[in-house]
Image (cartoon, rainbow, N blue to C red):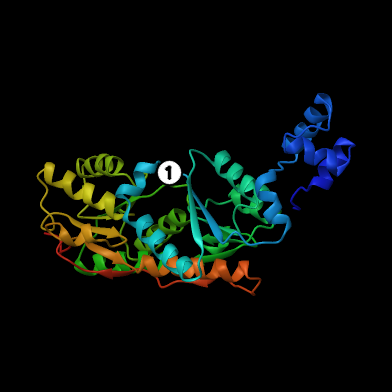
């Protein structure tokens, strides 16, 4: 998609480029009716005069954009995003780039940000997180032609470059570890089901449990918050055949699960083993410290930023496979009684 220009507005409105300039800059020289017609065309074409001058001159903004469709309060308690952003900032700063972070209440708002950023020339490229199957952001960015990197599996990134890690491999490693300890009643508190990486983890969990003959395996969907994880944990532990091991799709949920288990009088790890996805300092500071799937999330962010900057520079880029998370056993896991 081509950015709109003053010439486009002039052609659509049936006036000269000079008249468009007068109208957009609030200067005399055009009638009120002509000014109104020009402004209406500019709005319809999503032309923004202040930043288009720079874009038309071909200058780089040295800014990349990132939208997150999560409440701003999430960032204060979600170590994954803080570490990811830290890695992004580290690599971007090396090349004198800045990160424009925008929280969006919904998918429509995210799409509007992308279109506005493009039409205003505010960013040189964007990073895309929390990708769904058939995500409309992918098709929108392909349509705009704005350099973009998907932080997620390549199967849902369309023609966009992706940076990803093998969640299936990590899930298999965690379940095989629990099975080797002797657990046969294993459950999982998963992330948002619509997310592509959640779907990969869910399928991998079901597949490895079936292969190992773990018949009571179940996944309870949640939303990465401690509140949802605590509810899911209580429901699972209050059942007729409670699990002897629980996996959580992030560390915040695992901490909440540990607290809920204690409130129910369930001893960890004597009666219940707990594994967190994505290690963080809070996992190591608890008692007992949480067994976790560990990866260098900061390095993951650096790789994503480096790949995007290469695309912005016009270099050939391909999807990059980051190191998968590997299990770090700690005090929250043990053989079942």
Vertical side of 133 occupied by 332: above or below:
below
Vertical position of residue 317 compared to residue 71: above or below? below
- Whether residue 35 appears in this view of the structure is yes
Direction top: furthest residue: 33
Residue drawn at x 30%, y 67% is 294
Q: Check disc 1 and report its element: helix, strand or loop.
A: loop
Q: Which residue is drawn at 17% across and 66% down?
A: 330
Q: Residue furthest front?
A: 28
Q: Position of residue 9 (x, y in %)?
A: 81, 41
Indicate left or right for 59 with 105 as reference: right
> How packed is label 1: few (under 14 Cα within 10 Å), some, or many (20 or more)?
few
Residue 86 horizontal/vertical position (percent):
38, 62
Residue 254: percent from the left, percent from the top? 25, 52
Residue located beneath label 1 in the image: 70
Viewed as shown, does residue 12 lie left or right of 154?
A: right
Q: Residue 126 or 325: which is nearer the viewer? A: 126
Name the quadrant of the C terminus.
bottom left
Q: In which quarter of the image is residue 263?
A: top left
């Amino acid at each position: 998609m081509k950015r709109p220009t003053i010439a486009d507005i002039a052609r659509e409105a049936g006036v000269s480029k000079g008249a468009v300039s007068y109208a957009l800059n609030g200067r005399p020289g055009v009638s009120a009716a002509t000014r109104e017609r020009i402004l209406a065309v500019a709005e319809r074409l999503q032309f923004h005069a202040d930043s288009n001058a720079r874009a038309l001159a071909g200058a780089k903004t040295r800014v990349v954009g990132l939208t997150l469709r999560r409440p701003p309060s999430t960032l204060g308690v979600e170590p994954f995003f803080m570490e990811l952003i830290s890695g992004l900032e580290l690599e971007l700063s090396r090349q004198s780039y800045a990160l424009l972070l925008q929280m969006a209440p919904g998918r429509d708002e995210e799409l509007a940000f992308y279109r506005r950023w493009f039409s205003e020339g505010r960013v040189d490229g964007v990073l895309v997180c929390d990708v769904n199957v058939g995500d409309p952001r992918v098709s929108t960015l392909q349509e705009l032609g704005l350099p973009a990197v998907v932080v997620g599996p390549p199967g849902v990134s369309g023609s966009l470059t992706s940076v990803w890690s093998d969640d299936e491999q990590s899930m298999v490693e965690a379940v095989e570890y629990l099975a080797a300890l002797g657990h046969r009643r294993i459950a999982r508190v998963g992330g948002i089901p619509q997310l592509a990486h959640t779907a990969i983890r869910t399928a991998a969990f079901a597949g490895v449990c079936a292969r190992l003959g773990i018949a009571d395996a179940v996944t309870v969907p949640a939303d990465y918050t401690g509140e949802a994880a605590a509810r899911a944990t209580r429901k699972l532990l209050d059942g007729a055949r409670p699990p002897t091991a629980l996996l959580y799709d992030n560390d915040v949920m695992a901490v909440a699960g540990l607290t809920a288990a204690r409130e129910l009088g369930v001893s960890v790890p004597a009666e219940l083993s707990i594994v967190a996805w994505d290690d963080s300092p809070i996992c190591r500071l608890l008692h007992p410290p949480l067994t976790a799937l560990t990866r260098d999330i900061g390095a993951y962010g650096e790789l994503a930023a480096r790949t995007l900057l290469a695309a912005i520079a016009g270099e050939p880029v391909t999807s990059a496979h980051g190191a998968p998370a590997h299990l770090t056993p700690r005090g929250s896991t043990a053989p079942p009684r």
